[in-house]
Amino acid sequence: MIRARFAPSPTGDLHVGSASTALASFITAARVSGVNVLRVEDIDTPRVVRGAAARIVEDLHWLGLGWDEGPEAGGVFGPYVQSARTDSYARAIEALQARAMVYPCDCSRAEIAARTTEASAPHGDELVYPGTCRDLPRDREMKRPPALRLRIPDDAMVTFEDGVVGAVTSNVSTQCGDFVLQRGDGLYAYHLAVSLDDLAMQVTDVVRGRDLLSSTARQILLMRLLGARAEEIPRYTHVPLVLGKDGDRLAKRDPRVVVRELRAAGVPAEAILGVLAKGLGIVPDASPRSAKELARIATLPFSGEPFCYDDSALA
Ligand code: GLU
């Protein structure tokens, strides 16, 4: 049974980029009568916008991209909101600590930057950690509340087969080094939460935006270290990013790409879905279509090419 999930962070309103990911994930499960899970990723509290989760839920309903498990629907793997799952994140860190796989790090960002190079980072700027605190005594006096880092093993090569990109091999040591599991201010890191939740919710297919491709090796490595068996690790599919009309990065607050603004302007949900489905390469043309119809007629795999969200087709 396919179990796909859409995992938005409620940091703003749903735009056509995230709607495209939601559609891709929905189609992956719905076309084979699988299960769609909606999970609200609200642990990065300073970035969370009040009311955004409820608005995203409403916009997804309006688009017809429903879910079988998640907020409102419930389900056996709940809660489906990360802020209600932090106990499991704390337990996982304790389990890794018991195996000496976690250490405190009181380096400032400037200190790390002075010793290293930029890494590719989907969630905030991240640097390749040079291992400064790896072997320092744990009971030393800390300069600031320490972050907790994962001591990654010497062999940190990860290979996986992406549903769009094909075979991907990354070395987590050179990609980011010992990465943070919990920040000095207590916030749990995205990679920890997402890996634990995808395992706990028995997700078989992670379908998400290409901007997250570089985080996958880290997540697979972490899942393995947390004891996941090979068959428990999801398949990953990174769908192309949606670009603005001019081919640039999507301006996420531009009313022409915000789903509820399009709705307020009278654009039908089916028109938006049709354009996105064409861009994702799962239908031959951009005719308006419902999510249900798309689940019936979509042909996979998804395209690998980024596409512009061209609203002139919707005029
Ligand atoms: N919550 C993440 C985001 O909105 C997505 C996480 C994921 O799909 O793995 O960027």
Image (cartoon, rainbow, N blue to C red):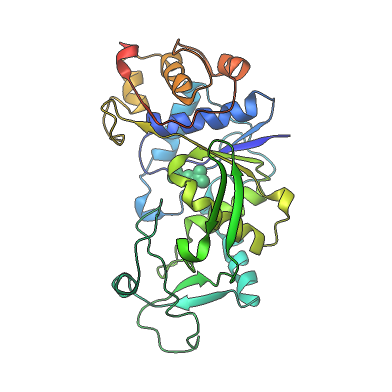
Left or right relative to 240: residue 231 = right
- Residue 108 placement (x, y as % from top left): 33, 74
Say whether residue 16 is visible: yes
Q: What is the total number of numbered labels drawn onto the structure image? A: 0
Q: Image quadrant for the N terminus? A: top right
Left or right relative to 242: residue 218 = right
- Residue 100 placement (x, y as % from top left): 61, 78
Depicted 11 relative to depicted 240: above or below: below
Depicted 95 relative to depicted 140: above or below: above
Residue at (50% x, 66% y) in the render: 173
- Residue 248 placement (x, y as % from top left): 28, 34
Closer to us: 47 or 288: 288
Question: Quadrant location of residue 276?
Answer: top left
Depicted 153 relative to depicted 81: above or below: below
- Residue 8 placement (x, y as % from top left): 47, 41
Say whether residue 85 is visible: no
Left or right relative to 272: residue 226 = right
Residue at (51% x, 41% y) in the render: 7
Closer to us: 290 or 308: 308
Q: Image quadrant for the C terminus? A: top left
Question: Quadrant location of residue 25?
Answer: top right
